[in-house]
Image: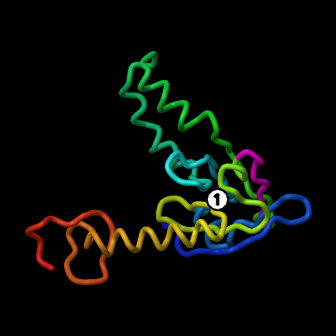
């Protein structure tokens, strides 16, 4: 699977549409004709999450382990599905973002599409910059690195205290 990389700024047009960045559309298409995605408000951050349908399906698969009538299953399913919106980009790569999602992210007209690996996020530009700065600072201050990597410049998921630096 190809990853969503980089940060791209865009703006709503007069009809309320926004162009998904070309590299993100190519990743969404993955060889098919359509750029299909599931949009949902992040339940952790003030942004809109955009999930390729196959990745969203994999995210939701563990819900099957819970009793369908349990509070846990109901809460998780509500959080994942109730505010999710499936969308296909048009031929020019444009989508119309639902107003409730724009409100959740505090977006009025300008936004940033931020690649974060398997998904991308849509942010108000100032909030996106704060998020990137906060993440970089937590990685730096926590001396985080990816498992199985050594040396400077590798960031993300945690470091064993005994791991070489």
**Which residue is pictured at 49% across the width and 71% down the height?**
132
As drawn, is 17 to the left or to the right of 159? right
As drawn, is 22 to the left or to the right of 51? right
Q: Which segment is the magenta one?
A: 94-100
**Is residue 96 highlighted in magenta?**
yes
**Which residue is pictured at 63% across the width and 41% down the height?**
84
Q: Which residue is mark 1?
A: 32
Q: How many marks?
A: 1
Image quadrant where one finds the C terminus: bottom left
Residue at disc 1, secondary structure: loop
Scheme by which the image is coloured: rainbow
Residue farthest to the left, as pictured: 162
Q: 157 and 127: which one is in front?
A: 127
Residue farthest to the right, as pictured: 14
x, y (%) of residue 64? 41, 28
x, y (%) of residue 45? 53, 53
Other residues around mark 1 within 10 Å, as few (<14) / some (14–19) / many (≥20)? few
- In the rendered view, would you say 134 is above or below 106? below
**Is residue 146 highlighted in magenta?**
no
x, y (%) of residue 158? 25, 64
**Which residue is pictured at 56% across the width and 61% down the height?**
120
x, y (%) of residue 91? 80, 63
Q: State the image quarter where residue 122 is shown.
A: bottom right
Residue farthest to the bottom, as pictured: 152
């Amino acid at each position: 699977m190809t990853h969503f990389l980089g940060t791209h700024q865009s703006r709503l047009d007069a009809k309320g549409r926004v162009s998904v960045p070309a590299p993100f559309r190519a990743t969404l298409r993955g060889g098919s004709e359509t750029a299909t995605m599931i949009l949902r408000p992040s339940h952790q951050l003030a942004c809109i999450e955009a999930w390729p349908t196959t990745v969203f399906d994999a995210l939701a698969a563990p819900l099957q382990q819970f009793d369908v009538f349990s509070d846990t299953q109901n809460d998780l399913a509500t959080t994942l599905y109730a505010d999710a919106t499936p969308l296909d980009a048009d031929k020019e790569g444009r989508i119309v973002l639902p107003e409730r999602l724009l409100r959740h992210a505090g977006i009025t007209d300008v936004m940033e599409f931020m690649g974060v690996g398997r998904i991308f996020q849509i942010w108000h530009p100032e909030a996106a910059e704060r998020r990137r700065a906060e993440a970089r600072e937590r990685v730096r201050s926590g001396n985080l690195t990816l498992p199985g990597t050594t040396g400077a410049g590798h960031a993300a998921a945690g470091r064993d205290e005994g791991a070489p630096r």
